[in-house]
Image (cartoon, rainbow, N blue to C red):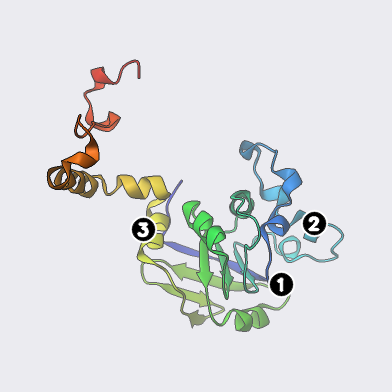
Amino acid sequence: MAGWSTHEGFAIALPRASVDTDQIIPARFMSASRAEGYGGFLFADLRDGAEEFPLDRHVDASVLVAGPNFGCGSSREAAVYALVDAGIRLVIAESFADIFAGNAVNNGLLPAAVEQADEILSIIGTGKVKASVDLQAGSLFIDGREYGFALPDMWRQKLVNGWDDIDLTRANLDEIRTFRAGRAKAAPWVFGPGGIKKSNSERPADENRGT
């Protein structure tokens, strides 16, 4: 996954509270291969029969502004896949479901919790406005107005570097090994009679053959 630190695009409004993951992508589409892309399934039931759905009016939008409690419901990661595959880089809402927010960051999508999300929804209306975000500076501009948003440092690292949880762990391997060695000296019984076992990454290449 490619990382990113700045983004400029158009923002559109979806003035709905508690948009759950089944609304983001209905369960019946989750049997499709991710390789085919999930973007075409995004908000399938909400768009079906709607005269003018925001994403249909403004197909070039990459920033979605919604009501509070976005991403509630099931923990399906496919909801994030659908948003990302449809070209959405940033979702703004007053609040997000915790599991959705974690899945979003692990897949390069920023869930920006903004207290003034209702104000932004009013500004956008049924149109689209320019939006920009700088992760390093922690700045967010919507239609020329600046808004604050919470961005934990761990989230910033993941988004900028294109990391998920495993990548973040690997970035701290030296500290992990140092802690493990100290723990082995202070409490050797924790590791059993054989002591510390080497991981595959610590073994010579010839020792890993056939494993």
Instruction: Identify which amino acid the numbered label 2 is placed on.
Output: Asp
User: What residue do we see at 48% from left, 57% from top?
Assistant: 105
The image shows residue 78 at horizontal and vertical percentages of 62, 48
Left or right, 112 with reference to 51 = left
x, y (%) of residue 127? 70, 74
Nearer to me, 12 or 18: 18
Q: Circle 1 sits on which residue?
A: 16
- Residues at marks 1 and 2, CA–CA distance in whole angstroms: 14 Å
Within 10 Å of disc 3 (Cα), the crowding (few <14, some 14-19, many 20+) is some
Name the one closer to the observer, 40 or 208: 208
Helix, strand or loop under label 3: helix
The label shown at residue 168 is: none
Placement of 160 over or under 131, stated as above or below: above
What's the amino acid at mark 3? Gln
Q: Earlier in the sequence, mark 1 or mark 2?
A: 1
Task: Name which of mark 1 and mark 3 comes first in the sequence.
Answer: 1
Residue 73 appears at what percent x and percent y?
A: 66, 60
Quarter where residue 92 is shown:
bottom right
| Category of crowding for the residue at label 1, using alpha-carbon neighbours closer than 10 angstroms: few (below 14), some (14–19), many (at least 20) | some
CA–CA distance between discs 1 and 3? 30 Å
Q: Residue furthest left?
A: 185
- The reply to whether discs 1 and 2 touch (Cβ–Cβ < 8 Å) is no
Q: Look at label 1 and name its amino acid.
A: Arg
Which of 177/39 is in front? 177
Residue in the picture at 42% in, 52% down: 3
Q: Which residue is mark 2?
A: 45
Horizontal and vertical percent for residue 15?
Answer: 70, 74
Q: Which mark is residue 157?
A: 3
Crowding around mark 2 (Cα neighbors within 10 Å: few <14, some 14 to 19, many 20+) is: some
Q: Identify the residue shown where x is 16% and y is 43%.
A: 181
**Relative to 17, residue 105 above or below:** above
Alpha carbon distance from label 3 to label 2: 35 Å
